[in-house]
Image (cartoon, rainbow, N blue to C red):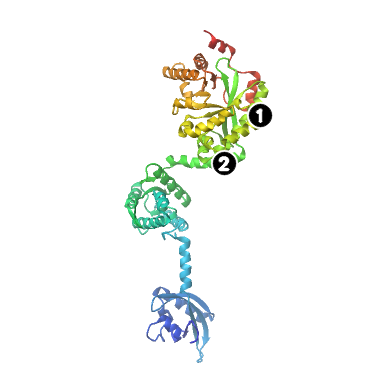
């Protein structure tokens, strides 16, 4: 026993120490003899009952036992693994041999691993995993007590700028200090977690009114606005906060975190350094947009997009000269999605490049079939978004569409907005010159509703102006709209540009525009957007407004 590297104790049938090895004495370091002590007296008060029960059980059962407990040493309380084994003394009584092995290092390692699994390595705050557990506990407690709680999502303002300019070491120090400051503003019962980057989440039990939430939020924001002195730099950041409450804004941890994060993003977008409480009526549209965007990616794979074709007719003879290709989306079981919803979304998420390429290719191939049915030339007008126009691959996409369809360049009209020209004039000029060199024509869509800079009419190779429906719908009664249309038509005539009036819905509008020199007409009066089969029928039957209309237009 003395040669063993472990601590060895011999106990009587009551748990008193009969013998203790020198190694055990070194560990305990009491400076006095411990023979006659109960073994449990060497442990902290919280562990004494565990040791006493283990001794009793081992003696009564006659089986060996093992427990992990702490033993008070001269420096601190160390973890030991105690192996209890029955034996019979020379006097014939039952006793215990207890071998204690120091497992403090092992216990410390396990504790560190447990802490690392549930806490952020940089700030020492709970991480997303522990936050989820705390939220579930808060929900369970709220169900028992009937008292709700709030979740605050906080994001540091201007942190990325600091991190990019001064490096990660300064950024990491800033995050640690920010975590300490935020922790100081909260109660002991509150939870503060770092969930990634410069994002923190606080859980406030019992705080559900907006006044309570705003009080805590103002304290946190004020603490973040105090300058940070880090590695010789004086740094100014701030914080934007979004809040959601249980159960009003979510009945599980995922919804609460999502809604708090949505409110926080709104706080950043509307001025920063403020707290926004989630409002279902206000933010449901954002959730709808997210689900709509996901559905859009599925729709591309499932072929839910298609093209309608709206006739463009001669303003005098009403003969169909071309069609504008208009993209449509039909969601299964939900019906059509307005282009005003999905086109801006496709522009923002990058899908417009894929959709635009498909639309351009499909429209060119379809107009070729229309030409075969009509037995005469027809052109197709296709809208080009800003993102498409700036894409380096656009010219290749256009060339491919013309090549595959067999159209010549003059049978394709690309519609662009004024904003494309003005946002980067040098790039626009280079692109338009290359497009024009292929014979493709260029139209300015919704002319008069954007920048309306006359300089680009001289600088860029533009062939057509499209008069927006906003200036057509009140013709001919509106004096102001009539004046605007007259000016545009006169300008186009002097610059030798074609004109297309959009949104023509009755004969009076058509007659007015034709008399003022408008070249082409597009609108419900001469044809709604239609599927290719309907367009073919239109071409075969020449089902356009009666020829008498042309006679009235041409009459003196």
Q: Nearer the viewer, mark 2 or mark 1?
A: 1
* Disc 2 to disc 1, C-alpha distance: 30 Å
The answer to whether residue 14 shows anywhere in this view is: no
Res. 412 image quadrant: top right
Q: Earlier in the sequence, mark 2 or mark 1?
A: 2
Residue lying at the far top of the rendered structure: 556
Res. 40 image quadrant: bottom left
Residue 382 vs 98, above or below: the answer is above
Residue 484 vs 327, above or below: the answer is above
The residue wearing badge 1 is 406
The residue wearing badge 2 is 297
**Residue 552's spot in the image, x, y percent?**
54, 10
**Residue 178's spot in the image, x, y percent?**
37, 55
Secondary structure beneath disc 2? helix
* Observer-nearest of 497 and 381: 497
Secondary structure beneath disc 1? loop
């Amino acid at each position: 026993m003395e040669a063993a590297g472990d601590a060895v104790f011999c106990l009587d049938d009551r748990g008193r120490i009969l013998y203790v090895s020198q190694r055990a004495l070194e560990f305990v370091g009491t400076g006095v003899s411990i023979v006659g002590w109960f073994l449990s007296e060497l442990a902290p008060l919280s562990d004494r009952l565990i040791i006493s029960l283990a001794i009793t059980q081992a003696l009564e059962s006659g089986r060996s036992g093992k427990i992990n407990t702490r033993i008070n040493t001269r420096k601190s309380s160390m973890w030991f693994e105690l192996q209890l084994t029955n034996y019979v003394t020379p006097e014939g009584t039952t006793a215990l041999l207890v071998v204690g092995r120091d497992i403090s290092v092992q216990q410390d390692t396990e504790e560190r691993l447990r802490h690392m699994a549930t806490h952020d390595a940089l700030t020492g705050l709970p991480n997303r995993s522990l936050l989820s557990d705390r939220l579930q506990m808060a929900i369970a407690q709220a169900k028992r007590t009937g008292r709700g709680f709030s979740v605050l999502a906080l994001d540091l303002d201007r942190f990325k700028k600091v991190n990019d300019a001064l490096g990660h070491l300064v950024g990491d120090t800033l995050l640690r200090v920010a975590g300490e400051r935020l922790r100081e503003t909260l109660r002991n019962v509150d939870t503060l977690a770092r969930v990634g980057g410069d994002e923190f989440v606080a859980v406030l039990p019992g705080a559900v009114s907006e006044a309570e939430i705003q009080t805590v939020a103002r304290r946190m924001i004020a603490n973040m606005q105090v300058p940070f002195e880090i590695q010789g730099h004086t740094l100014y950041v701030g914080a934007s906060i979004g809040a959601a409450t249980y159960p009003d804004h979510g009945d599980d941890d995922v919804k609460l975190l999502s809604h708090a994060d949505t409110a926080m993003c709104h706080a950043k977008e509307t001025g920063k350094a403020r707290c926004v409480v989630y409002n279902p009526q206000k933010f449901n549209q954002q959730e709808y947009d997210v689900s709509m965007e996901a559905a859009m990616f599925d729709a591309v794979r499932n072929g839910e997009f298609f093209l309608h074709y709206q006739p463009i007719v001669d303003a005098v003879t009403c003969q169909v000269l071309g069609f504008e290709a208009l993209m449509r989306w039909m969601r299964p079981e939900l019906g059509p999605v307005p282009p005003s919803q999905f086109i801006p979304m496709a522009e923002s998420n990058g899908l417009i490049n894929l959709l635009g390429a498909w639309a351009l290719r499909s429209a060119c191939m379809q107009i070729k079939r229309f030409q075969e049915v009509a037995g005469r030339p027809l052109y197709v007008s296709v809208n080009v978004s800003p993102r498409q126009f700036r894409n380096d691959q656009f010219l290749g996409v256009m060339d491919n569409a013309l090549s595959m369809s067999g159209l010549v360049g003059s049978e394709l009209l690309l519609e662009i907005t004024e904003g494309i020209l003005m946002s980067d004039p040098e790039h626009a000029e280079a692109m338009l010159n290359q497009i024009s060199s292929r014979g493709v024509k260029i139209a300015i869509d919704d002319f008069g509703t954007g920048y309306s800079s006359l300089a680009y009419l001289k600088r860029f190779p533009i062939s057509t102006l499209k008069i927006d429906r906003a200036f057509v719908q009140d013709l001919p009664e509106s004096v102001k709209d009539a004046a605007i249309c007259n000016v545009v038509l006169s300008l186009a005539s002097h610059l030798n540009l074609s004109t297309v009036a959009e949104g023509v819905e009755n004969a009076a509008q058509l007659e007015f525009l034709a008399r003022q020199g408008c070249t082409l007409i597009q609108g419900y009066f001469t044809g709604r957007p239609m599927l290719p089969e309907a367009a073919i029928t239109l071409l075969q039957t020449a089902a356009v407004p009666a020829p008498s209309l042309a006679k009235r237009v041409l009459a003196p």
